[in-house]
Structure formats: C-alpha cells, structure tokens
C-alpha cells in the first residue's frame, strides 16, 4: 500500500512540474523569485478573455510611487482592445531602494560606488521574468513590449542602453525626470550598438554631439 502511495505521489509531482502555472484569470498577481539574487517580488498581471500563450506580452514599469497594481489597471482597456498580456513587476523600495535601485537599475552600489554584478541589476529582472514565463508555458512569444512612465521611463531607456541583448520587440516611454546621455568627446560604442571599429565609435559620438548642438540653436 505504501509503495502505491509513493508511486502516486511521484506521478502527481511529475504532473505538477510538467504543467505550466497559469497566470491569474484577468487581473491578479503572483510571486517571482529573481534567480540571481533570490529576492522575491510581487508581479501584477492582466490577461484579457481569450488570451493564450501566443498573446503578445507588454511589461509596464511604474513611476516614482511604484504603484504596480494601479499601472496594471490603467492598461486593462488597452489590453482588451489590442489583446495583450500585461505584466507590471513591483520593484519594492526595500529591495531596490531609491533612484539608484530603480531608476538607475541598481547598476552601482550606492555606498561603495562599485559596479554590481549584472545579475543584480534591476534591468536584468525583466528578461529573467520573461524567461520564467516561457519556461512555465505562460507565453510562447520570443520577445516582449516595454512601457515606462516617469521613473519607469528612466528605467526603460537605461535598460535598452545597458542591456541591449534584452528580448525587447519595441519600447515606448515618457516623462523621464532626467536622461542618461553620452558624454561628448567620448567613444559612443554603447549608444551606437556594436561599432565595427574604434573609429566608428568616435564618429558616432561626434554625430551625437553635433545633433545636440543643432537642437540648441
């Protein structure tokens, strides 16, 4: 009898591991553990009726108040109209404190001013979360949309700059309090993508600075 119960338990466990954990129906939230740091975060989501693993995914990044549930709610009508799965991760003040932790992506340790390992950057959480959704069978999409407002816009444009390999299909952001810009006179390899040579990087930087000068006139 015990052997039968043990076999049943093993089969039940195998079945649970082989099936995707679905998103909450329509509006809801779920917990996600960041693989590189072990930090747990609450993720707010919405999927319209009829959504499935082929439905496009949009990640929504909040402003200064980190009110992920409200940002999720503000996307509901758009998600219904355009058939989108909305994912709004909550970067808590405790785990991602202040501007350094969220707006600037936790790239640098605010106390030591040393660069953190890339796995600790807030920017890399988005791809990690998307990869987990793929693994769980929630989505079959290979890339995602990205939206940010205010502090979330700061997050988005810096993520695209410093994590260019992220699986972002398209991004839009607005009302950033300030922007990260290239320094004039410095090679612009990050901003120009993978420049073929140092000469290309310097040329890109010069063109960028010329564009800035033209706009000031």
Image (spheres, grey):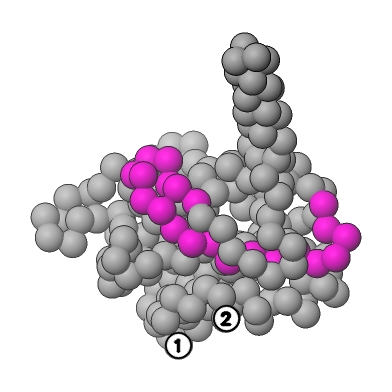
Residue 34 in the image, given as x and y percentages of width and height: 43, 47
Most distant residue in the front direction: 1
Q: Mark 2 or 1, which is nearer the eye?
A: 2
Residue at screen point 83% across, 58% down? 51
Residue 169 in view, yes or no: no
User: Quadrant location of the C terminus?
Assistant: bottom left
| Residue at the image position 15 percent from the left and 56 percent from the top | 113
Question: What residue sits right under mark 2 in the picture?
Answer: 70
Instruction: In the displayed orientation, state which residue is furthest to the left.
Output: 112
Q: Can residue 114 be seen in this snapshot?
A: yes
Say if 13 sits above or below 50 in the image: above
User: Relative to 161, is 48 above or below?
Assistant: below
Residue 1, given in percent of the width and then of the height, sits at 65, 14
Residue located 64% across and 37% down the image: 135
Q: Does 36 appear in magenta?
A: yes
In the picture of the structure, the residue carrying the numbered disc 1 is 217
Q: Nearer the viewer, residue 128 or 172?
A: 128
Identify the secondary structure beneath mark 1. loop
Residue 153 image offset from top left, x and y in percent: 49, 73
Q: Give above or below for 68 relative to 56.
A: below
Q: Is residue 34 magenta?
A: yes
Instruction: Tell me which segment is drawn in magenta.
Output: 32-52
The quadrant where residue 123 appears? bottom left
First along the sequence among labels 2 and 1: 2
Per the model, the C-alpha gap separating discs 2 and 1 is 41 Å
């Amino acid at each position: 009898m015990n052997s039968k119960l043990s076999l049943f338990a093993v089969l039940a466990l195998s079945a649970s591991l082989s099936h995707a954990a679905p998103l909450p129906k329509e509006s809801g939230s779920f917990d996600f553990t960041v693989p590189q740091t072990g930090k747990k975060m609450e993720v707010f989501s919405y999927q319209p009726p009829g959504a499935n693993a082929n439905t496009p995914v949009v990640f929504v990044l909040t402003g200064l108040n980190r009110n992920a549930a409200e940002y999720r709610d503000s996307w509901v009508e758009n998600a219904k109209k355009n058939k989108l799965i909305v994912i709004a991760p909550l970067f808590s003040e405790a785990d991602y404190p202040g501007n350094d932790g969220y707006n600037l992506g936790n790239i640098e340790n605010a106390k030591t001013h040393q660069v953190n390992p890339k796995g600790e950057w807030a920017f890399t959480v988005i791809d990690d979360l998307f990869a987990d959704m793929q693994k769980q069978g929630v989505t079959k999409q290979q890339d995602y949309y990205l939206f940010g407002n205010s502090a979330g816009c700061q997050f988005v444009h810096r993520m695209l700059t410093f994590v260019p390999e992220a699986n972002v299909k398209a991004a839009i952001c607005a009302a950033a309090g300030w922007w990260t810009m290239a320094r004039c006179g410095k090679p612009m390899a990050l901003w120009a993508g993978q420049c073929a040579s140092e000469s290309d990087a310097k040329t890109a930087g010069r063109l960028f600075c010329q564009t800035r000068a033209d706009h000031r006139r």
